[in-house]
Amino acid sequence: MARLQEGPHSSTAAEWPVDALMRAKDTTTVSVVLPARDEESTVGDIVTTIRRDLVERVPLVDEILVVDSNSTDATAERARAAGARVVAQNAVLPHLPPLTGKGEALWKGLAASTGDIVVFVDADLRDFRSHFVTGLAGPLLADADVCFVKAAYERPYVGEDGVPRPAAGGRVTELVARPLLNMFWPELAGFAQPLGGEYAARREVLEQVPFVTEYGVEFGLLVDLLELVGLDAMAQVDLGRRTHTHQSVAALGRMAGQIMHTAWSRLERQGRVLSSEPPAGTLLQFGTDGAGLADITVAERPPLASLVSGRELARRDVA
Ligand SMILES: O=c1ccn([C@@H]2O[C@H](COP(=O)(O)OP(=O)(O)O[C@H]3O[C@H](CO)[C@@H](O)[C@H](O)[C@H]3O)[C@@H](O)[C@H]2O)c(=O)[nH]1
Ligand SMILES: O=C(O)[C@H](O)COP(=O)(O)O
């Protein structure tokens, strides 16, 4: 219990009513950025809800940006029809060779957006309501010392039968990410959902940290932000319950590998492990169709601020 008491400042979404946030907002601008790869079934509803509640009803959100992450379905069209600005991942900073994955989508979203506060929300959420955004923006608008806010929630597993199994979701979180954090960065153990895709931060802070590509991005951000701003500037907000589209166990195996690679890279960078050779970048997986080798390496984008005039570049380059 001692550890929990020393954990991040915590609140619940109900503590951040929108009228109080409007008073605190003043001239601060807020962007909501959604990374989306083949999310045509959910992205439209999420954008519609944010637009209706937090742009039209109350002007808390200044920009809704969907980063179309090489989708092959109607994600971009649905997002645009619902009122988002949509950028293609590879059209942002096009002079850089493109990388892949969720971390790349977020880094490009940071480059292409303009808000002082950036709220990231996954585009595959099934029960999205606007308190996700107000809860995440609240601590940042209310307290100048807070730099980063991470969501916590209960995560059921909803199988093909549609029946939610309470607290059975977040398999990589429970089996890989939280054990690793407890072992090597125990200050971060109080974050209940370290891998969750819903978090918010001040732009000036996000632009100072690297973004790992693929699914290493959330783990890397937590570790790097702890080093940059310290636990006192990091907060957690309880958003209630979150349901999303589950990936297969094989896909989660690859995600777990990417997260382990990210943890290894931070341990090495912090001088806490010495290796004579890097960890293997492949994962042998056995499926019903036979065995195959999957690439589980991650790449890394540098802090956006290290690019010459990154925001100006982004604005100029995005079509
Ligand atoms: O190449 C990609 C892959 C994913 N996404 C989007 O990123 C979000 C989350 O991706 P998803 O595949 O649904 O991830 P989860 O299985 O839900 O993984 C969890 O754990 C990951 C590792 O921390 C986080 O990145 C996720 O946000 C978190 O929900 C969704 O909107 C995706 O469309 C992209 O934009 N590009
Ligand atoms: O955060 C996680 O562990 C992954 O997103 C997997 O979540 P799931 O077990 O709910 O599919």
Image (cartoon, helix red, strand yellow):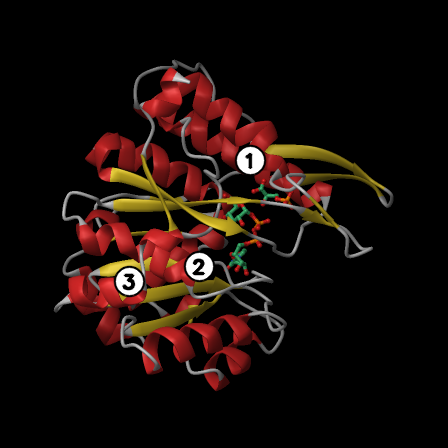
Where residue 143 appears, x then y in whole percent?
17, 48
Question: Marks 2 and 3: CB-CB under 8 Å?
Answer: no
Which residue is pictured at 44% across the width and 25% down the height?
181
Which residue is pictured at 39% across the width and 75% down the height?
53
Q: Earlier in the sequence, mark 1 or mark 2?
A: 2
Type of the residue with mark 2: Val
Where residue 42 appears, x then y in whole percent?
59, 69
Please say if 199 is above or below 276: below
Type of the residue with mark 1: Thr
- In the picture, residue 114 is in which quadrant? bottom left
The residue singled out by tag 2 in the image is: 121
Tell me if the residue at label 1 has its CB under 8 Å from ligand 2: yes
Where residue 84 appears, x then y in whole percent?
41, 78
The quadrant of the image that shows the N terminus is: top left
In the picture provided, is 7 more to the left or to the right than 303? right
> Which structural element holds mark 3?
helix
The residue singled out by tag 1 in the image is: 173
In the picture provided, is 216 more to the left or to the right than 42? left
- In the picture, residue 316 is in which quadrant? bottom left
Q: Is residue 304 visible?
A: no
**How far apart in space, not on screen, are marks 2 and 3 (Cα)?**
16 Å
Tell me if the residue at label 3 has its CB under 8 Å from ligand 1: no
**How far apart in space, not on screen, are marks 1 and 2 (Cα)?**
17 Å
Q: Residues within 10 Å of mark 1 (few under 14, many from 20)?
A: some
